[in-house]
Image (cartoon, grey):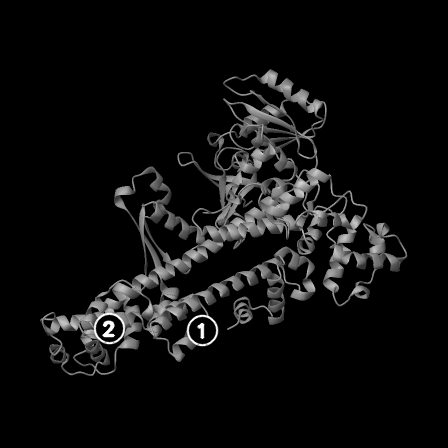
Amino acid sequence: MTTIDFIVFRSHLPVKNVKNTVQLLAEGATIPFISRYRKEITGDLDEVQIGEILKFKTEYEELKKRKATVLKAISEQDALTPELEKKIKSAADLSRLEDLYLPYKKKRKTKADIARELGLEPLAKILMAQNSENIEAVAQKYTGKELLSAKAALQGAKDIAAEWINEHEGVRNQLRKLFQKQAEIISKEVKKKIEEENAQKYRNYFDWKESLNKIPSHRLLAILRAEKEGFVRVKVEVEKEDALQIIDQFILKGAKTSCTPLVEEAINDAYKRFLHPALSNEAMASAKEKADEGAIQVFADNLRQLLLAPPLGSKRILALDPGFKSGCKLVCLDEQGNLQHNETIYPHPPQKEVAMASKKVKSLVNAYNIEAIAIGNGTASRETEFFIKKIHFDRDVQVFMVNEAGASVYSASKIARAEFPTFDVTVRGAVSIGRRLADPLAELVKIDPKAIGVGQYQHDVDQAKLKNELDRVVESCVNSIGVNLNTASAPLLSYVSGIGPALAENIINFRSEKGEFSSRKELLKVPRLGAKAFEQAAGFLRVPISENLLDNSAVHPESYGVVEKMATDLKVDLKEIIGNKALISKITPENYISETIGLPTINDILHELEKPGVDPRKSAKVFEFDPNVKSIKDLNPGMKLPGIVNNITNFGCFVDIGIKESGLVHISKLANEFVSDVNSVVKLHQHVQVRVMEVDEQRKRIQLSMID
């Protein structure tokens, strides 16, 4: 099986498309570049499909590497037959490969090994043949100094037989299917720990049983976390009789002899000691992997929505990081997000310097021509919002609540220290809040996605897979929007196709020394940025000040010639085409198809020419919580409240209603009809109306409904 065969088998994509995509990946092309600028070659595959190809390519390479290790290990034992070698090379997955390797795998000395050393393997073969009418008499011949009885000899033979049964390929395959179909996860409480306070959130799982094949990912991860914390014990079970019946069909011969009861004992022993533990662990690992994928996908979807949240744009912003005793840290930012001023005000108890704080805010709004105020949604956020809205400004100033999750992580990071070496973490945190309002994507790329707070059991899933997927999402979002080459930070540039951290720093250093880039072509002067990196990156970078207007669009430089020919054919200057729908409508796409550029790329170019460089994200909107709700004590069942969706899971969404605790809208309460996918009803940061269903003040849990 070749790489292409394996990927086609797993992805169900056309062979030609897979082959061409694998070739592009091998040449160093990135997923965003391939999906945007190589549609003709891939058959118009999207980012998700290309990502799948890359994933299966990696899986195949890992399988191939493992096969080489297995073949070498068996060969060194002089046990590799042509038939076994063929089976190993054709194995399509790791489970099949490991089953083939099991009899040859080096392991600790077992009961079967001891029995073999005592010369009992011939007796075990006679036992498994099951045609002896007096197996005890046969066993008597194997007794001696170390084996004092036929019973002891037969026990050794059974130990060897149990190992053979465990290594039987057909047995393992059929039992694996049984576990896949029938396995149940069972959890029981650890009695000595159930009274602990932290145990109460897991009380639903103190006596729980559910199909492992059907259990939702969030529930499996919750049960496994409860087990990890010592509150429950977990096991995976199938009907033992069904399992033994499968083994019997492979091992037991037709007619009963004196060997039959002993072989049945070996079957029971093999199942109890080897097969059940191994296959239950395998089933759990498979379910956990599936749950991880579900949780990672939830996190990825949420992260994408968060990164692509509506930006306010280039505005002068006053940002506040609220607090009580320590005061509210205040910063003023210009249109580019540069820090102009910072100080601390104390409008809340214990100082409660309301008049002084009001006067200060009003004067700063005037002095720095502030257009919007951003308030972090942490401690004292509602109180700070009430305080700000009581101030009578001389101009129209919009007030926004900004999700500050991860701001503290950023403020203590190496990136923040490099940006603001002379300021402390409180100033950096306030700056981050203000910049998030202006452009969430540009600011959030500086923070580890796991610190942003939109995941579901993110600490319980495979961390390497989580990081890979989140990095892919960030890369996808950055490249889908495009990046201003002259204002982008190093972290933002590092996610641009073909650039990475090292080249991002080189670009920043070049910009600092030489000044702003005047064109895309000037990128080639950056140290270590060669033709390949330019090819991958150029289409995703914007240069608004360039004389060539295409440098501020998603049209790739390799296609500039096509646009120039369009202008020539229309007998107009290139500048006249851009943004002119009437002229663009006169262009016949088919006239510009060539060996290198097909219809999908031509259509992309025409679409981009209509609105070059326009940010596809919507604009940020002001939102107001119910002013009468300030804490969980103010909530009563039946109340209708405005809210903002701040996290999405497989079982529902969490809604910020303006207090410390977010409320849960269970998936069954999202709409009047059945909902299978939460994302089909709500999106992150969506403004919604909810009704309070239930309030558990002691456990700080709020149940909400969106059903009218």
Pointer 2: residues within 10 angstroms few (<14), some, or many (20+)?
Answer: many
| Residue placed most toward the observer, 328 or 508 | 508
Question: In the picture shown, does residue 283 fall above or below 419?
Answer: below
Say whether disc 1 or disc 2 marks the residue closer to the N-terminus: 1
What residue is shown with label 1? 89
| Residue 369, x across and y down, in percent | 72, 26
Question: In the picture shown, does residue 585 fall above or below 613?
Answer: below
Q: Secondary structure at mark 2?
A: helix
| Residue 253, x across and y down, in percent | 25, 81
Please state if 638 lies on the left or on the right of 304 as rendered.
left
| Residue placed most toward the observer, 563 or 611 | 563
Question: In the picture shown, does residue 212 fall above or below 415?
Answer: below
What residue is shown with label 2? 161
Please state if 385 lies on the left or on the right of 216 as rendered.
right
Residue at (88%, 60%) from the top-left corner?
569
- Amino acid carrying label 1: it is Lys
- Amino acid carrying label 2: it is Ala
Which of discs 1 and 2 lies nearer the camera? The answer is 1
| Residue placed most toward the observer, 309 or 571 | 571
Quarter location, residue 598: bottom right
Please state if 202 lies on the left or on the right of 60 as rendered.
left
Pointer 1: residues within 10 angstroms few (<14), some, or many (20+)?
Answer: some
